[in-house]
Image (spheres, coloured by chain):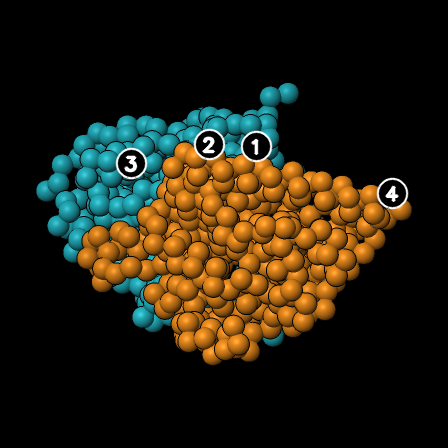
Amino acid sequence: MENFNVYAVRLLPKGEYIAPGHRACQGCAEVLAVRLVGKALGRNTVIACATGCMEIISSPLPTTSWRVPWIHVAFENAAAVASGVEAGLKVLMRKGRIPKKKINVLAMAGDGGTSDIGLQALSGALERGHNMIYVCYDNEAYMNTGIQRSSSTPFGAATTTSPAGKVKPGQVTWKKNMPEIAVAHNIPYVATACPSYPFDLMEKVKKAAEVEGPAYIHILSVCPTGWRLAPDLAIRAGRLAVETGIFPLYEVENGKYSLSVEIPKRRPVEDYLKIQGRFRHLTPDLIQKIQEHVDKKYNNLLAKVRFSEEMS
Amino acid sequence: MPKRVGMEVSIAASEAVRLANVDAIAAYPITPQTHIVEHLSEFVANGELDAEFIPVESEHSAMSVCCGTSAAGARTFTCTSSQGLALMSEIVFIASAMQLPIVMILANRSLSGPLSIWNDHTDVMLVRDCGWIQCFGENGQEIFDLTLCAFKIAEDHRVILPFIVNMDGFILSHVIEPVELLDQETVDKFLPVYKPVYRLDPDNPVTMGAFAMPDLYTETKKAQDERLKASKPVIEEIWKEFGDLTGRYYSPIETYKAEGAKTLFVTMGGFSETASTAVDMMREEGEPVGLCKIRLWRPFPFEDFWKAVKGVDTLIVIDRATSYGGPGGPVASELRSALYTWEDAPKVVDFIAGLAGRDVAPGDYKKMYQRAQQRIASGDIAGYEIYGVRE
């Protein structure tokens, strides 16, 4: 792939829907994911955004980074607001008050706004079956308020409310499995993605836009600031998360699991953990504990993939 | 001439929403609001109303969905009560700041605890400062009329603000009253299709709900306050237009037998009807009493209030909510404040009464009147008295 750059630029849609000049940190992989999601969806998109990093970096009055219609109401209700936008557009098109055309309705929130405070609103919206896409940009803690732990923070990570102390090794609980919670709602499309795999991410967003009904995409968004990681390592960290099996890339289409990126030989989790300051306190036995947990979870996923293949 | 029909007030309210041809309804069930959402979902299920009915999982999401539908450009309605309002209150404040002209009927009910489903005004007082236009209706006809007018006022381009119509739970929501409905043609002429100034439109992208740093927050709040205050003449204009259409005129402050009265009871909502009966009774007995009804609570109609109480010696305020350890019930506190600069202001005697459905009969007004005389005679009119406590 000598000419990869030339090739990649040609493949990417040229539209930019989040303008440069926003205030994201250097190396922020979340805003990169936002940019890719925008490119995949195009201009006929309305975004409902939760309070959080992406809201704060993009919308200080009287300026905005958004080139598509965008609404922010509160922290925990992006899914509810988006479901309202979807219902509103639908009824106005039905009544002939606005032109009939496909408009993508995208809800976006961080891991706190999704797996903690926004879980109820999300569950309601998924259950009601709105034709919308929900994207969780998961940077594994409340980064906007200063790196506090969420239910999406991985075991062992030090945050400002799960500090590594003399008796506690940082976060003591395992990461909540949000994609599985979305799957449990029997929605047509669930996927995981990471901007370190940009084409995979964009393909999934396009698929999500095409399905009828709710789609959920969980995007691991590396946060150099919160993960205590050099900004130039953000993309590599995302790849390592996938290559170690810590964050496998997969899709669940109408209940059918498939792996997006096959990892014949997973790297040890240590490769991923050791480049991040949030894990620097981990002892070999804790790393081993994480390795065993990841092995178990990854094998569970493989079993679901195999089961889906056998059933089809 | 339209016919007066006996119907439950909640049905009359639902009929107003149907005639308003709303585009979207998001609501979560809570007593005593349930009959309204039940009727509305029936209308939608039977094709009598072409709207999206979004049966949300909480009131917080109800108001959030309403923000979404309204921002998309849809005429939007919700209704709730008590705990539901408390749960959605975070978003209630945001809806007005974002100028989303949602109409909400609030079937007033007390707040927990102890849990009670019955009527008072503690719920609406929780969101007193939410920046919505807020009015009270005292009977089924008024709820029907005020709800129809609410859409027209909220969506008027000089206003563009959300609107709460307060309807006392049970004592209005669940009673059957004679109500005169309007036909669709008349309503359509009075209330044309909603034309939003801004909506979420990919062809004209706008950013809604941006955040403000300290250098702009104050200015946004000043603008919001000015806008709410400036809605008053529009409210009066639209109520007048409705009056010319139906013969039923509404004013921000209304009085009953105030002429020659030395004492005025001050009430809001359904209690005004009982208070009128009490005034009739006491007038017959020769007492110089009358009634002042506050219909428009926000924006507060200061001029109208001053005009209504000029020359009166005493105001007996029936507050239906408590401000624990405060200077009085919310209504009396505001009226005292409104009268503060007057040299010959009437005395304000505050009773907190009718909490959580405790009945306040005409005879109780007479007792409060007598008790007020005692309090004035003993110079004890500061603060408030919780009336009718069983000891």
Q: Which mark is residue B112?
A: 1
Local crowd size for mark 1, using a 10 Å CA cut-off: few (<14), some (14–19), many (≥20): few
Gap in Å between the C-alphas at discs 2 and 4? 53 Å
Give the label, 4 or 3, closer to the camera.
Answer: 4
| Amino acid identity at mark 4 | Val
Which marked residue is nearer to the observer: mark 2 or mark 4?
A: 4
Q: Is residue B329 left or right of residue B65?
A: right
Kindly indicate the quadrant of the structure image that contains residue A204. bottom left
| Residue A252 left/right relative to B339 | left
- Numbered badge on residue B41: 3
Q: Nearer the viewer, residue B82 or A224?
A: A224
Q: Which residue does the image show at 60% across and 21% down from the upper left? A: B390
| SS class, disc 3 | helix
Tell me the amino acid under the disc marked 3. Ser
Amino acid at the residue labelled 1: Ser
Tell which subunit mark 1 falls on: B
Which tint was used for chain B?
Answer: cyan
Q: Is residue A101 above or below residue B350?
A: below
Mark positioned earlier in the residue sequence (3 or 2): 3
Residue, disc 4: A167
* Tag 4 and tag 3 share a subunit: no
Q: Mark 1 and 4 residues: CB-CB less than 8 Å, in contact?
A: no
Toward which corner of the image does residue B17 lie, by quadrant?
top left
Rate crowding at label 4 as few (under 14), some (14 to 19) or many (20 or more) other CA atoms within 10 Å: few
User: What colour has chain A?
Assistant: orange
Chain letter of the residue beneath label 4 in the structure image: A
Q: Is residue B101 visible?
A: no
